[in-house]
Amino acid sequence: MEKLKQFYEKCRVYLTRPRLELVAVVVMVLCALSVFLLNTPKKGVLTLDGGALVYDGTLVRGKMNGQGTLTFENGDQYTGDFNNGAFNGKGTFQSKDGWKYEGDFVNGQAEGQGKLTTEQEV
């Protein structure tokens, strides 16, 4: 407790109200900037599951968000909209086996309007 009192007496000269207000404003500005910068979309490449999934596109807070392409280890590929790490919105899923689905996706699943094309263009 004695050391704390000594520290306070030593620093009391610097602990004026204007200086404390300035420090508070600086801390608030830094907090606001960090929130803004963390939520800013950035282009990047994300490798997941030991290289089994490779995403090239927009990232927000380290998650797939916005436009991008996800390539699977087996050669399948999805190109389109992502939201919070899942297929969400308009996109195209191209299978390595030759079939393709173009249309709407919700939470990683084909849903709504879309077109399924097989190798024989059926």
Image (tube, grey):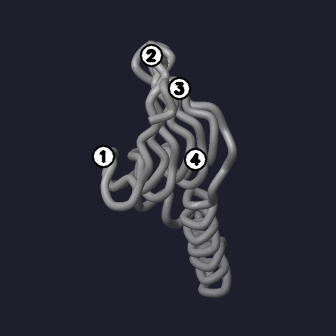
How packed mark 4 is, by other alpha carbons closer than 10 Å (few <14, some 14-19, many 20 or more), is many
Image quadrant for the N terminus?
A: bottom left
Amino acid bearing label 2? Ala
Amino acid bearing label 1? Gln
Q: Are marks 1 and 3 in contact (CB under 8 Å)?
A: no
The residue that label 4 is drawn on is: 59
Q: CA distance from mark 3 to mark 2?
A: 8 Å
Q: Looking at the rendering, which quadrant does residue 26 occupy?
A: bottom right
Residue found 56% across the figure and 55% down from its top: 66
Figure label count: 4
Residue found 53% across the figure and 26% down from its top: 71
**Label located before the other in sequence (1 or 3):** 3
Question: From what the image shows, is residue 60 above or below residue 8?
Answer: above
Tell me residue 116's x, y (percent): 41, 42
Give the number of the disc on residue 98.
none
The residue that label 1 is drawn on is: 109
**Label located before the other in sequence (3 or 2):** 2
How packed mark 3 is, by other alpha carbons closer than 10 Å (few <14, some 14-19, many 20 or more), is many
- Mark 2 or 4: the one toward you: 2
Q: Secondary structure at mark 1?
A: strand
In this view of the protein, which residue sits in the foreground, 117 or 113? 117
How packed mark 2 is, by other alpha carbons closer than 10 Å (few <14, some 14-19, many 20 or more), is few
Q: Looking at the rendering, which quadrant does residue 57 occupy?
A: top right
How packed mark 1 is, by other alpha carbons closer than 10 Å (few <14, some 14-19, many 20 or more), is few
In this view of the protein, which residue sits in the foreground, 72 or 35? 72
Amino acid bearing label 4? Leu
Give the number of the disc on residue 71.
3
The residue that label 2 is drawn on is: 52
Q: CA distance from mark 2 to mark 1?
A: 19 Å
